[in-house]
């Protein structure tokens, strides 16, 4: 287990090193993370170790989507091209999930097994605001479901993997 953790940390450091040296780190080899985007991520999450990043367009806004760890904690962050943090997520344990949210999930999918929970924080005018919880779980028939639930228990989004 320790070897696996060391390998993950090493790979993350190599990705960060390659990205900071100006080399291309995306799958196509054509994009680079702008310095101001990395500076914004590092200012908000000092000591982070990037494990994966992608560049996406949401309408007319360019977003850099990062997956990283900080002090062993799994996190994700979306940073706009201008260096503004759009939102961020951190992995939490089931016992840290508010009861109202857990009850909604348990009632909707009673036999599902929770695989991952990410607490979503929006950054609005520079202020962190809890937005909800992204929960990934597996049903008895091995189907992966992802739902986003607001802090008050209202389901915001649901992806059952079914095509419509």
Image (cartoon, rainbow, N blue to C red):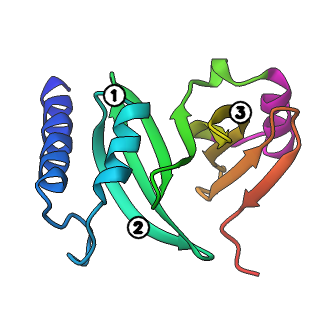
Helix, strand or loop at mark 1? loop
Q: Residue at x 45, y 51 (%)?
A: 83
The location of residue 155, given as percent across then percent down, is 84, 48
Marks 1 and 2, Cα distance to the nearest angstrom? Answer: 21 Å
Q: Which residues are magenta?
A: 99-113
Q: How many marks?
A: 3
Marks 3 and 2, Cα distance to the nearest angstrom? Answer: 24 Å
Tag 2 residue: 55
Tag 1 residue: 46
| Looking at the image, residue 142 lies above or below residue 85 | below
- The residue furthest top is 95
Q: Is residue 154 magenta?
A: no
Q: Residue at x 39, y 41 (%)?
A: 41
Q: Residue at x 73, y 41 (%)?
A: 111
Q: Residues within 10 Å of mark 3 (few under 14, many from 20)?
A: few
> Which mark identifies residue 129?
3
The location of residue 44, given as percent across then percent down, is 44, 32
Q: Residue at x 19, y 55 (%)?
A: 19
The location of residue 105, given as percent across then percent down, is 79, 39
């Amino acid at each position: 287990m320790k070897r696996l953790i060391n390998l993950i940390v090493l790979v993350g450091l190599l990705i960060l090193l390659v990205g900071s040296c100006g080399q291309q780190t995306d799958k196509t080899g054509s994009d680079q993370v702008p310095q101001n985007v990395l500076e914004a991520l590092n200012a908000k999450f000092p000591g982070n170790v990037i494990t994966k990043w992608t560049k996406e367009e949401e309408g007319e806004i360019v977003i850099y989507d990062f997956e990283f760890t900080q002090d062993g904690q799994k996190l994700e962050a979306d940073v706009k091209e201008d260096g503004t943090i759009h939102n961020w997520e951190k992995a939490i344990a089931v016992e840290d999930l508010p009861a109202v949210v857990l009850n909604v999930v348990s009632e909707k999918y009673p036999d599902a097994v929770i695989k991952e929970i990410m607490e979503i924080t929006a950054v609005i005018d520079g202020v962190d605001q809890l937005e909800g919880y992204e929960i990934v779980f597996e049903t008895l028939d091995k189907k992966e479901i992802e739902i986003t639930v607001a802090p008050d228990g209202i389901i915001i989004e649901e992806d059952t993997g079914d095509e419509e």
